[in-house]
Amino acid sequence: MRVEANVSLNKGTKVEVKNLNSFKAVERAIDYEIKRQKEILENKDLPAGRQEKVIHETRGWSEVKQKTFSQRTKETSEDYRYFPEPDLPPLKILKKDVEEIKAEIPELPAARRERFKKEYKILEPAIETLITYRYLGDFFEEAVSELKAWLESGRIKTDFDKLVKLSSNYIITELPKYVSLTGEIKITPENFAELVYLTFIGEISSSGAQAVLKEMFRTGADPSQIIEKKEIKQVSGEKELEKIIGKVIKNNPQAVKDYKKGKQNALQFLIGQAMKESKGQANPQVVEKILKKKLK
């Protein structure tokens, strides 16, 4: 591979750096040449006759010295074998035209990446997925916007940053399972935001959330309707769970003895029995808390 880079900081004066053989060499040669030309153009304090000028020339690149060096000068456009086209009028681009074009260009990946880092404080892998698949990034922002509006209105009260992180996790791990190849998402950001919030506050378990999300894509119903219909609301009330746990302790005396002897596996067994007794609706963290309290 051979690349020739043209660098011009001064209107009408072009420097050509020839025979660059790698992307790194191109990058370093251009950086060096920009710095070299800038120093010449800005050095106006020297006495007349000692001021250096940027001239039309061909330069080479020294990989050893990491600098360009002059090979030959070219004084006219003919030396470069290009000529003005008489049938093309001069083109003048106004500043307002540039601004209009900029306004029409969507946010570029690099700018979006930096904004996501500052605005949402989510992990790098999540950001890369949301940048790579723009439709997921757009959906994420719409869902987060819903959550933010609810928070500002007082509809919800919670740790917003953790809610945003949970939203990004569900979008990059669960949503792609149900999204068509066209990138069409058949649920609304508002319904998705509601599902994330209900999961975050413990209304449903993470496995329950996955089942609800699948049903949302299938029927288009909102998460609250699906949770009520399927009776998968997570039980976190201690009074209700104490009844279930009392039954589990009574029916599993050996596991109780094993736990009191220091066997932690016995506790996990008892938690599993409580989950089974509640048909998967018990909040496992609350179950563990009550079990430890009762088995002291």
Image: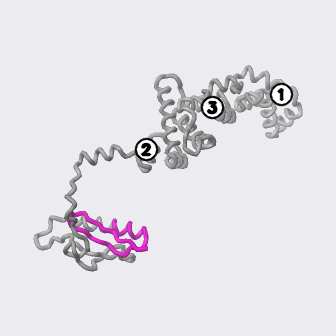
Q: How many C-alpha atoms fall within 10 Å of the one at disc 1: few (<14), some, or many (≥20)?
A: many
Indicate the position of residue 25 as horizontal and vertical percent values. 40, 70
Q: How many residues crowd mark 2 within 10 Å: few (<14), some (14–19), many (20+)?
A: few
The CA span between labels 3 and 2 is 30 Å
Under mark 3, the amino acid is Met
Tell me which numbered mark, 1 or 3, is placed earlier along the sequence: 3
Query: Magenta segment, which residues?
Result: 1-30
Q: How is the image coloured?
A: one colour
Q: Check disc 1 and report its element: helix, strand or loop.
A: helix
Inspect the image, locate mark 1, and give the three-letter code of the amino acid beneath it: Val
- Residue 41 seen in this snapshot: no
The residue at which mark 3 appears reads as 216
Q: Secondary structure at mark 3?
A: helix
Q: Earlier along the polypeptide chain: callout 3 or callout 2?
A: 2
Q: CA distance from mark 1 to mark 3?
A: 34 Å
Alpha-carbon span between mark 2 and mark 1: 51 Å
Contact flag, marks 2 and 1 (Cβ < 8 Å): no
Judged from the image, the secondary structure of the residue bearing numbered disc 2 is: helix
Q: Are marks 3 and 2 in contact (CB under 8 Å)?
A: no
Q: Residue at x 80, y 31 (%)?
A: 276
